[in-house]
Image (cartoon, helix red, strand yellow):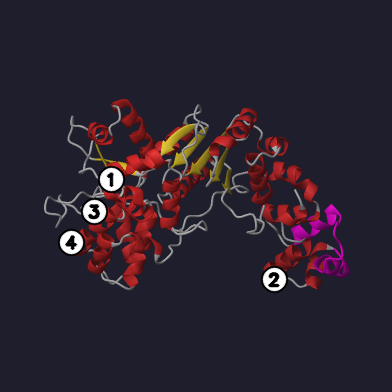
């Protein structure tokens, strides 16, 4: 741990004094610390002040525990573990605040929090396509535990670029210790001394290689008996990091036989993708009322964008330029234009959504990619039996391949009649990427509705 992980002591003191609305002279009067000493601290002339001096200044400025920790850490980086241990609480470690309510994931949230409440499930992995909402679901589950049980939450972005600058605040050293541990470092002693037997949730958001991290995570869990860990990743590791929880795109409405309307008395009830998309529409175009016509058009757009939350958000942003009907025409002809045009607020630094989806396809070996192309050419919904006949493989081998593609999120299960065979389809955006990125299988790719 080095002193660069927090702002300088001089800057922290200046900012704290200004937030308190005090001059140096007023702070000196309240704290009994001389004006000269305060001036020297704020100008960086004194690097290691006495702890009693910092305590007097913090009391005079009525600083919170979190601010006091930052102050002491800036003055003595080696005191991090000791200070964290004394201050470690739900107030010190909290998940990030969401920008909007969680829509359409109630069942998944209950399943995830139910697993976290189970004392036997301590390492959980949320896996799914980029943009499907893994981070948002993990965030909501963390918020539930933090608010309900006052559980400290260490939210650790694992895909943070190395040159993005240090994190600030009391959580910064803890987050960095977790990153170092996951990446092969030795931070067991520091983390176990702080966490100990306290209930804690660590979220490793965007972990690229969860398999490589498993030994370190299991070792940490062994010493911190009330610790639980959630990993979010787009890769299915072998072996998986604990219990695997696949996150599929939001269910999309099925079209009627003629493709012109959607069946059912309600166009929104039970259709979370439509509900989410309408929330984006109301934000981008508050003048568009959710009439039956608008809602039906939105439902068709949701189907073309596969119910992937980030794809829906990106598509809705184009309503600044297009009408809903024009947006649907684009979604039917060139849907990839909608996911790459206007980057949504949840965009990743790893590239556009189509680039990140293409990276998932690029990870497939040639045999699996060819099999996926074969599936994309089958009439919908297709079954495992139909896939085996089309690919010329055994039923057992086909079932394993279909299962693998389901875990990767590249195909989805469709609603079926009770007692009938289970049907599947390849995601529409995946079809488009197959056409654009794998010429060898382009002749196998069929058209969607």
- The image shows residue 59, relative to residue 141, as above or below, that is below
Residue at horizontal 27%, vertical 47%? 444
Label 4: state its secondary structure. helix
Sequence-wise, which precedes: disc 4 or disc 2? 2
Residue 305 in the figure: left or right of residue 310 = left
Task: Kindly identify which residue carries mark 4.
Answer: 292
Identity of the residue drawn at 26% across and 58% down: 301
Whichever of callouts 3 and 2 sits on the residue coming sooner in the sequence is 2
Residue 41 colored in magenta in the image: yes
Q: Kindly state the secondary structure of the residue where label 3 is placed.
A: loop
For the residues carrying marks 1 and 3, which lies nearer the camera in this image?
Answer: 1
Judge the density around disc 1: few (<14), some (14-19), many (≥20) Cα neighbours within 10 Å: many
Tell me the number on the disc at residue 21: 2
In space, the residues marked 4 and 2 are separated at their CA atoms by 55 Å
Residue where numbered disc 3 is placed: 268
The magenta segment is: 33-60
When the figure is inspected, residue 111 is found, relative to residue 274, above or below; the finding is above
Of all residues, the one furthest to the front in this rendering is: 440
Q: Earlier in the sequence, mark 4 or mark 3?
A: 3
């Amino acid at each position: 741990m080095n002193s660069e992980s927090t702002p300088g002591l001089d800057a922290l003191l200046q900012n704290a004094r200004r937030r308190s609305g005090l001059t140096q002279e007023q702070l000196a009067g309240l704290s009994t610390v001389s004006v000269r000493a305060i001036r020297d601290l704020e100008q960086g002339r004194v690097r290691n002040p006495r702890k009693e001096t910092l305590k007097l200044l913090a009391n005079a400025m009525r600083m919170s525990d979190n601010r006091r920790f930052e102050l002491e850490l800036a003055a003595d980086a080696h005191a991090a573990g000791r200070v964290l241990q004394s201050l470690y609480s739900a107030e010190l470690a909290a998940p990030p605040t969401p920008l909007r309510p969680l829509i359409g994931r109630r069942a998944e949230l209950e399943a995830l929090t139910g697993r976290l409440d189970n004392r036997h499930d301590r390492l959980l992995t949320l896996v799914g396509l980029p943009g499907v909402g893994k981070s948002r679901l993990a965030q909501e589950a963390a918020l539930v535990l933090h608010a309900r049980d006052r559980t400290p939450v260490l939210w650790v972005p694992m895909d943070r670029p190395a040159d993005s600058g240090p994190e600030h605040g009391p959580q910064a050293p803890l987050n960095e210790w977790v990153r170092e541990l996951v990446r092969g470092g030795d931070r067991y002693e520091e983390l176990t001394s702080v966490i100990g037997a306290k209930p804690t949730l660590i979220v490793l958001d965007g972990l690229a290689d969860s398999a490589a991290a498993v030994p370190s995570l299991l070792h940490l869990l062994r010493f911190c008996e009330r610790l639980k860990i959630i990993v979010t990743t787009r890769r299915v590791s072998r072996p998986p990091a604990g219990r695997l929880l696949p996150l599929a795109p939001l269910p999309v409405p099925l079209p009627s036989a003629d493709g012109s309307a959607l069946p059912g008395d309600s166009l929104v009830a039970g259709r979370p993708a439509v509900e989410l998309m309408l929330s984006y529409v109301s934000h981008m175009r508050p003048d568009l009322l959710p009439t039956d016509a608008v809602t039906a058009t939105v439902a068709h757009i949701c189907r073309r964008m596969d119910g992937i939350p980030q794809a829906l958000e990106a598509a809705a942003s184009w309503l600044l330029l297009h009408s809903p009907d024009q947006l649907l025409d684009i979604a039917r002809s060139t849907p990839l234009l909608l996911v790459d045009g206007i980057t949504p607020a949840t965009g990743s630094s790893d590239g556009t959504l189509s680039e990140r989806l293409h990276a998932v396809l690029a990870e497939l070996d040639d045999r699996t990619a060819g099999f996926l192309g074969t599936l994309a050419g089958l009439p919908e919904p297709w079954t495992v039996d139909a896939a085996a006949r089309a690919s010329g493989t055994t039923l057992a081998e086909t079932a394993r391949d279909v299962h693998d593609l389901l875990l990767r999120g590249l195909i989805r299960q469709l609603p079926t009649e009770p007692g009938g065979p289970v049907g599947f389809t390849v995601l529409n955006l995946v079809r488009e990427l197959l056409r654009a990125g794998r010429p060898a299988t382009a002749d196998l790719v069929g058209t969607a509705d």
